[in-house]
Image (cartoon, rainbow, N blue to C red):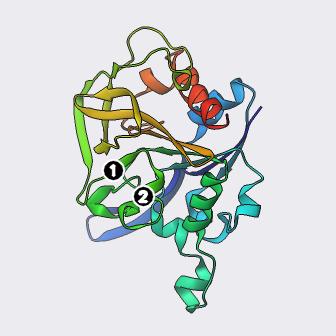
Amino acid sequence: MSRVLVAGESWVTQSTHIKGVDTFTTSSYVVGVEPLRRALESRGHQVEHLPAHLVPARFPSSEGELSAYDVVVLSDIGANSVQLAPSVFEKAIPGADRLGALRDWVDAGGGLLMIGGYLSFTGFEGKAAYRNTVLHDVLPVELLAEDDRVELPAGTRAEVLDADHPALGGVAGDWPALLGYNRVRPRPESSVLARIGADPLVAVAQRGAGRTAVFTSDCSPHWAPEAFCEHWDGYPRVFGGLVEWLAG
């Protein structure tokens, strides 16, 4: 059993309704982590979810705090949310370098997985912004300087390059179609296990005493349709395999 921290995968939506001369707003809170949580828990892993709105205040600030986990998953949460604690951003009080602590924790033996989304890698309009952080060199891929999203509304299936790698969990057969991903470039020292077109979908690498991996599409809608994340028996194998490989 591995102890897994998943940061991100939640959001708040606010809608404005205009009816003639009158308007009103409604808000909703959505949690997208459940398919991933169920998949990992079904394989015996202990999952702690840190929702996106709590990441700035509660993300681990030191290697000691990170040592409570075997694997950290960053999913659809930008670098600013991880790096800028409220005391730093709102009060200009110097604080911990949390991305630096995450890098050092990986070098010391931790496992890091980044999953794609609008606020992953470089992200929508460059707002995820990991390329300009110390975490960039930890990832098994190089990030683009510009908006890296590739939308595939008609759907495209992944090509598996190394089905026998333990990080893919022994999944067999064709994967369901995905509707998009973040475009990245593989590093020479990384292993690309699956790709979409010429771009990595799953890539892994050793980093110091630790390991890092990326899944550049989503773990929930909209890039991951229900056929992928709810109805495919390979879903828990892929994400379970990634977590188990990362945890060593």
Q: Is residue 13 left or right of residue 91?
A: left
79 is higher (above) or lower (below) than 176: below
Quadrant placement of the C terminus: top right
Q: Is residue 134 visible?
A: yes
Q: Position of residue 43 (x, y in %)?
A: 70, 24
Percent from the top left, x then y, of residue 192?
A: 38, 31
Q: Is residue 248 left or right of residue 185?
A: right
**Disc 2 residue type (three-letter):** His
- Which secondary structure, mark 2? helix
> Does residue 18 appear in the picture of this structure?
no
Question: Which residue does the numbered mark 2 point to in the structure image?
Answer: 136
Do tag 1 and tag 2 residues touch (Cβ < 8 Å)?
A: yes
Residue at position x 56%, y 67% in the image? 100
Quadrant of the frame with the N terminus: top right
Quick one: which residue is furthest to the bottom in this view? 92
Where is mark 1, residue-wise? 142
Foreground residue among 87 and 98? 98
